[in-house]
Amino acid sequence: MGSWPGPYLGDGNNVAVSLIHAAGLTGARLTLAGPSGYEPPARHVEIGRRLASASGGEIRLTNDPQEAVRGAEVVYTDVWASMGQEAEAGRRREVFSAYQVNARLMSLAPGAYFMHCLPAHRGEEVTDEVADSPRSVIFQQAENRIHAQNALMILLMA
């Protein structure tokens, strides 16, 4: 199928849902890879696919992190246990361990950048080696979020 601009690896949480909607609206191709039982809510996948069919994008799901990353331009992940899921953290570390973004996984996408919405749990969803690499754009991503949030506040206050 050729390279895909970017996969998201991990939990089907709010970040995954936002990426699904954004990809659907903008015509992007997005692969989401996570363990069975932790997929994004089906209704959001359906909405994203409906939007993508109109915009020329595509949303696909897989349980294979290598398949998702191979040839990607960007690799995105988020924490495995979000706020309110602390009691599940140990179990989630076991379930998601194959989805850790590490040097071996990034080697399948030699030119890919790494993204994370932060804060990251280093040693869990991402290794220090990847987070601190020249291919990591996590701090630029965080800075850009400041400007987007300021613009939203100005819009809402007007």
Image (cartoon, helix red, strand yellow):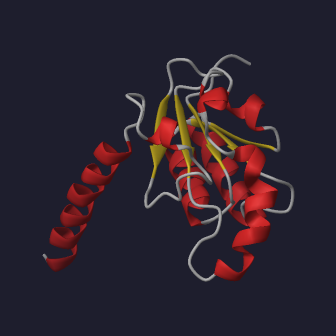
46 left or right, relative to 83 = right
User: At which x and y percent is residue 61?
Assistant: 77, 44
At 71% across and 82% down in the image, what residue appears? 87
Q: Is residue 46 left or right of residue 76?
A: right
Whether residue 39 is visible to the viewer of this picture, yes or no, is: no
Estimate the x, y position of residue 31 in percent, counting from the top left: 68, 39
How far across and how far down the image is residue 63, in percent? 82, 44
Q: Up-down: is 128 above or below 73?
A: below
Quarter assignment of residue 41: bottom right
Task: Report the side of 102 relative to 151 (left or right).
Answer: right
Q: Residue at x 44, y 61 (%)?
A: 119
The C terminus lies in which quarter of the figure? bottom left
Residue ID at (74%, 19%): 1
Which residue is found at the position 60% from the left and 28% from the top? 106
Which sits in the foreground, 15 or 157? 15
Q: Is residue 114 visible?
A: yes
**Position of residue 33 in the picture relative to residue 28 (left or right):** right
The answer to whether 51 is drawn above or below residue 148 in the figure is: above
